[in-house]
Image: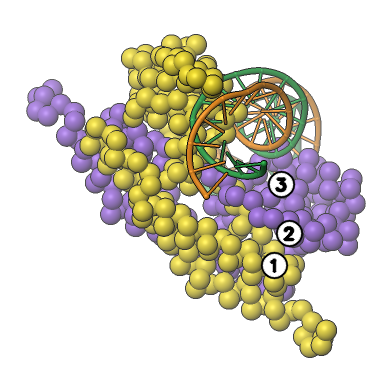
Chain colours: A yellow, B purple, C orange, D green
Amino acid sequence: MDVKTFLLGLLALGEASGYEIKKRLEGPFSHFYDASYGSIYPALTKLAKDGLVDCESLAQDGRPDKKIYRISPAGRMALIDALGEPLLKDKVRSDFLARMMFAALMEPRHLEGLITERLESHRAVLAEIASDEMGLADLDDSNDQNSLKFVVGFGDAINRAAADYIEENRHLLEASAFVRREPAAAE
Amino acid sequence: MDVKTFLLGLLALGEASGYEIKKRLEGPFSHFYDASYGSIYPALTKLAKDGLVDCESLAQDGRPDKKIYRISPAGRMALIDALGEPLLKDKVRSDFLARMMFAALMEPRHLEGLITERLESHRAVLAEIASDEMGLADLDDSNDQNSLKFVVGFGDAINRAAADYIEENRHLLEASAFVRREPAAAE
DNA sequence: GAAACCATGTAAGTTGTTACATGATTGG
DNA sequence: CCAATCATGTAACAACTTACATGGTTTC
């Protein structure tokens, strides 16, 4: 799903500015979708130009106008159309797993650091989800609430499984790495 | 990790042609890395030009020469350097989860189809991993074998967790979708 | 006889990121 | 006082995908 469609969907759940959208994407959705300001702002401009969203400019003191976007009836139809299209394969590129493939070429200390770092990042996500910092509470529609519960719960399940797996299997990487290097080189 | 570095890493595990690399990427690594011919072939050409890999052309009957690439000493050093750099965030973009966020706008039948399709794709990956079609057996180095065991096992754990989660929680999406639509409209 | 596999490569196009530009306000 | 937050936008760039080009061989 491209950025335009995704933003249209987010606006179907409630009005927002570009800045607010970006902040939300940094929360509990970041595990399956991400977008930078550099793609969000142009996308919103394009959606407005195509009549799929309405835009209200709120003048502010020292800052640029805050622009509140709302989905239009045409936008809702376009979104429904887009949701009817065939499912695309997920795109994943994991720097972590790619490196683990070549763990045998890494310094043991460095390797250990990467693994620990990764474990901590999974734990941080789990903590964030558990503490419900995600403000899904502000949705009127209980269907939408259930949808968000589903995707956030999905992130919880995946991060939990990943953390558990790493803990239980890091020895596969670390044991061999430690063996291979300076067996008894009393430095 | 960009395509060039990843290919360099794969070649560190053993020689291969561009075509063979692509085939391997369609196997048990596809859950965390993917690349098309259009990125593989130019990357190999570039690596050879930079002296990081050596290339041997094998003439063949009706086909283009098969080009076997092997990592060079310089390539090995470049790879080790690259592996020492700071870890990048995984990039994930899930069309499936993005759509589930907007499940309330989908036709119930269509939604059900998407969920079932997704479940089956997880199960297919699990079956493929279980049947060990991945030919990691042809590695001499036991360190490399352990590394591959780790990343493939990671895929197994994640796919299992995802499938279980979907089975247990699809009702969150489907229940609400069915309710909202023609409560008793005897078509 | 059609589809899939083997085998490489290029060019055009899409999509998105990074860095820059601007600048007041609030919290530590 | 420095960093972070609020707030939008553009332009240059990077990276990758898709489709095209070529064409024999093997499998159903």
Q: Mark 3 is on which residue type?
A: Val
What amino acid is found at the position of numbered circle 1 in the picture?
His
Q: Are marks 1 and 3 on the same chain?
A: no
Q: Which numbered tag is attached to residue B162?
A: none
Q: Which mark is residue A110?
A: 1
Q: Nearer the viewer, mark 2 or mark 1?
A: 1
Camera-nearest residue between B15 and B7: B7
Mark in front: 1 vs 3: 1
Q: Which mark is on residue B3?
A: 3
Chain identity of mark 2: B
Mark 2 or mark 3, earlier in chain: 3
Q: Indicate the position of residue B183 as horizontal and vertical percent values.
A: 12, 29
Q: For the residues tagged 2 and 3, is the chain the same?
A: yes
Which element type, helix, strand or loop, lies under badge 2? helix
Where's residue C22, x and y in %? 66, 21
Instruction: Using the numbered discs, state the Cα–Cα distance from disc 1 to disc 3 in whole angstroms.
Output: 22 Å
Residue B14, quarter of the rendered image: bottom right
Quadrant the C terminus of chain A occupies: bottom right
Q: Residues at badges 2 and 1 in contact (C-beta under 8 Å)?
A: yes
Residue bearing the label numbered 2: B83
A73 left or right of B49? Answer: left
Residue at (88, 62) in percent of width and height: B73
Residue lying at 20% horizontally and 35% vertically, measured from the top left: B178
Task: Tell me which residue sits at (77%, 85%) in the image.
Answer: A183
